[in-house]
Structures are given as structure tokens and as C-alpha cells.
């Protein structure tokens, strides 16, 4: 199906451009893309629900790091829960069948929680930075009350960055009876919106996470120099920190590079249909690839964590104990009833 530039969607922003209205594109492999989105959605829901269950049902209160990780899992869960709508949209060759309200709601939730997820990673990085680099200072910033306030600010920031999506996301049916879900903005507003997203959605998070990672690695290196025991104890942490940063870079850098190239194409800084088509194809792929970070987050930040594994094991033991107690109680009651029936008979 041939798609005009105004009908090429993106989850986090608009790819449309009137200047390239003469360029047409066929988005290839829509079936494979839809399947990939559904796989991300299913895995993200399973992993993040598991994380939230461990934090919610465990008897001990959450630490500061676990408060951030719980909110991170919540943001990733909301994001992946709404991805099936977009998978159906792609599978239908970009024909939106869920109505105008769901067009706005789906894109707002995806957009908001993508930004929230990134900033919860920032909070986790800052917390680890304070814990390892400044363990004896900034104690106030590592208290649960402060952590909860930080999470509220992140949710508020995510909602604020999503205001244009809430207001300007629309549906439109073309001459071939295909309904598209797109962001309807003029050039000036669109450019401002994109620059804000690039700055607050990527530049600030990546700079903060990179700074914390470098400082953490230096602190761990100094501690490992103190003895072999310390080196063994902190070897996993030393490995995990750069892996987390690398995962964030791999998932989000290509997406934001494509976002910048889309701006260059929209405003004819780099003209030509070939460039436009290549950017449109790449933008589709890397938009969905970025969401894979919501599957990696619970693995890298939580499931690999020693404390989380300990909590999960304790929770399973707690459930098994309750199940055993309930079974024994039912067995005892059944036995007693049987004995009473035999005596009366």
C-alpha cells in the first residue's frame, strides 16, 4: 500500500511533511513489524508485572532504589500495555480503527511513559552515584520521602512533555478510506516540539547517566584497588553499570538520530525523495526498536540485582508456605468431618 508522507506515523512524534508531499513510500514488512511490536509488548508486560508483584507483595518496605525501580517498571508496563494498539495499526497497513480518543490516549501513554522511563533511569543512576561516590553525604536525597517526591516530579514532567500529543493528535480519513493517526502541527510548532523532545527526552538524560556512570566506575576502580575481596564483591556492579548505559545508547541513540534527520528532510536542509524514503524506513524500525529498552530495563536493573533475587525467593517461599498451610488446613477439616460422619453412622 502506498503511503503519502502525511500518513507515515511515529509513536513519539510526527513524521509528516508537506514539503515532501510528492514523495511516496511503501513501508515494507508491516507484518513482521507488527509481530515484533506484539512480542515486545508481551515480554514487557510479563517482566514488569513480575517486578511490580515482588515489590508490592513483599513484606519489607521498599528502599530508595526499589522505589525508583518500581516506578520504572510501572512506566514500562503502561508503555508496553498500549503497544498492541499500535501493532494492530501497523498490521492494518497504518489504518487506525480505534477512534480519535484512543488515537490520542494511546500515543499520549506511549509518549509519556517513554520519557518517564528514561528519567527513572536517571534517578537510579543518581542514586547509585550518591551511594557509591558520596556514601557519607547527601543522606537526605537518599530517603524514601525524597525518592517519592522525585518520582512525582518525573511523572509530572512526562505528562508535561506529552501535552502537544494530547492536544494535537488527530485522525484523518483519506480518499482510499484509510484512517491515519497523526500529529497535526504547523512547521514552527513542530520544530519547537521536536527540539524540546530531543533536549529533555534524550540530551539531558544521556548526559546525566553518562556523568554518573563515569563517576561510579572511577569509585569502583578505587575500591577494587583496596583489596581482592572488594573486587569480588563489586565486580558485578562494575560490569552492570556500563552494560546499562550501553543498552540505553543502543536503544535510544538511533531513534533520536532519525528524529534529527527527519527534521532535516522536513525543512529541506537535505532535500530529495531518496533521503526522505530512507529516513522514513529507518524511523519506523528504530522507533519500535527503542521500545525494546522497556523489556531490558527489568532485566538489567532489577532481575540481575542480588537484592531483587533475594526478595523474589523470599516471596515465593512465603507463597509456598501459605499454600501448604491452606492445604493442610483443608485436609485437617476434611479428615475431621469424615471422622464425625463415621461416628454418627
Image (cartoon, grey):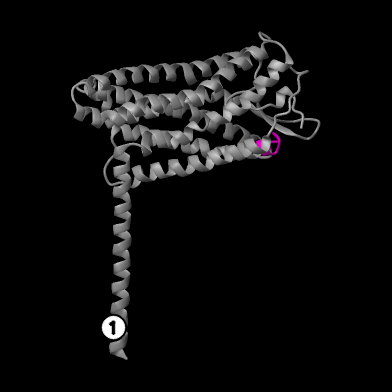
The picture places residue 147, in percent across and down from the top left corner, at 32, 29
Q: Is residue 129 visible?
A: yes
Q: In terms of image quadrants, where is residue 139?
A: top left
The picture places residue 312, in percent across and down from the top left corner, at 33, 46
Q: Is residue 237 left or right of residue 42?
A: left
Q: Give the residue drawn at x 32%, y 85%.
A: 341
The boundaries of the magenta stretch are: 90-96
Q: Nearer the viewer, residue 234 or 64?
A: 234
Residue at the spot of label 1: 339
SS class of the residue under badge 1? helix
Q: Is residue 63 left or right of residue 180?
A: left
The picture places residue 98, in percent across and down from the top left corner, at 66, 40
Compared to residue 93, the image places residue 275 above or below, namely: above
Compared to residue 201, the image places residue 335 above or below, namely: below
Q: Is residue 329 left or right of residue 173?
A: left
Magenta includes 74? Answer: no
Q: Is residue 184 visible?
A: no
| Residue furthest bottom in the image | 345
Q: Give the residue drawn at x 27%, y 41%.
A: 61
Q: Give the residue drawn at x 26%, y 43%.
A: 60
Q: Nearer the viewer, residue 100 or 182?
A: 182
Q: Is residue 292 left or right of residue 89?
A: left
The picture places residue 49, in percent across and down from the top left corner, at 43, 44
| Residue furthest right in the image | 175
| Residue furthest top in the image | 269
**Dividing the image into 4 quarters, which one contains the C terminus?**
bottom left
**Dividing the image into 4 quarters, which one contains the N terminus?**
top right
Magenta-drawn stretch, dominant element (helix, strand or loop): loop
Amino acid at each position: 500500500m502506498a503511503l503519502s508522507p502525511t500518513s507515515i506515523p511515529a509513536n513519539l512524534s510526527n513524521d509528516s511533511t508537506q514539503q515532501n508531499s510528492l514523495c511516496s513510500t511503501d513501508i515494507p514488512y508491516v507484518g513482521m513489524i507488527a509481530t515484533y511490536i506484539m512480542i515486545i509488548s508481551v515480554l514487557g508486560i510479563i517482566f514488569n508485572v513480575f517486578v511490580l508483584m515482588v515489590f508490592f507483595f513483599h513484606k519489607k518496605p521498599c528502599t530508595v532504589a526499589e522505589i525508583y525501580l518500581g516506578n520504572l517498571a510501572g512506566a514500562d508496563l503502561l508503555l508496553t500495555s498500549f503497544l498492541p494498539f499500535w501493532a494492530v495499526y501497523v498490521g492494518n497497513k497504518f489504518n487506525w480503527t480505534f477512534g480519535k480518543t484512543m488515537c490520542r490516549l494511546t500515543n499520549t501513554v506511549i509518549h509519556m511513559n517513554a520519557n518517564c522511563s528514561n528519567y527513572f533511569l536517571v534517578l537510579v543512576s543518581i542514586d547509585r552515584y550518591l551511594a557509591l561516590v558520596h556514601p557519607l553525604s547527601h543522606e537526605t536525597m537518599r530517603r524514601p520521602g525524597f525518592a517519592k517526591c522525585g518520582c512525582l516530579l518525573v511523572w509530572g514532567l512526562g505528562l508535561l512533555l506529552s501535552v502537544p500529543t494530547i492536544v494535537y493528535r488527530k485522525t484523518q480519513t483519506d480518499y482510499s478510506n484509510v484512517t491515519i493517526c497523526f500529529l497535526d502541527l504547523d512547521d514552527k510548532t513542530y520544530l519547537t516540539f521536536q527540539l524540546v523532545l530531543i533536549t529533555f527526552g534524550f540530551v539531558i538524560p544521556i548526559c546525566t547517566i553518562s556523568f554518573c556512570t563515569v563517576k561510579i566506575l572511577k569509585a569502583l576502580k578505587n575500591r577494587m584497588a583496596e583489596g581482592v575481596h572488594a573486587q569480588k564483591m563489586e565486580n558485578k556492579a562494575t560490569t552492570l553499570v556500563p552494560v546499562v548505559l550501553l543498552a540505553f545508547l543502543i536503544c535510544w541513540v538511533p531513534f533520536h538520530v532519525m528524529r534529527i534527520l527527519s527534521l532535516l528532510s522536513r525543512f529541506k536542509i537535505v532535500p530529495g525523495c531518496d533521503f526522505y524514503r530512507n529516513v522514513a524506513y529507518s524511523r519506523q524500525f528504530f522507533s519500535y526498536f527503542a521500545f525494546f529498552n522497556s523489556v531490558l530495563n527489568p532485566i538489567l536493573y532489577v532481575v540481575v540485582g542480588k537484592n531483587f533475587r533475594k526478595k523474589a525467593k523470599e516471596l515465593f517461599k512465603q507463597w509456598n508456605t501459605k499454600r501448604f498451610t491452606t492445604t493442610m488446613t483443608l485436609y485437617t477439616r476434611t479428615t475431621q468431618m469424615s471422622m464425625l460422619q463415621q461416628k454418627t453412622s
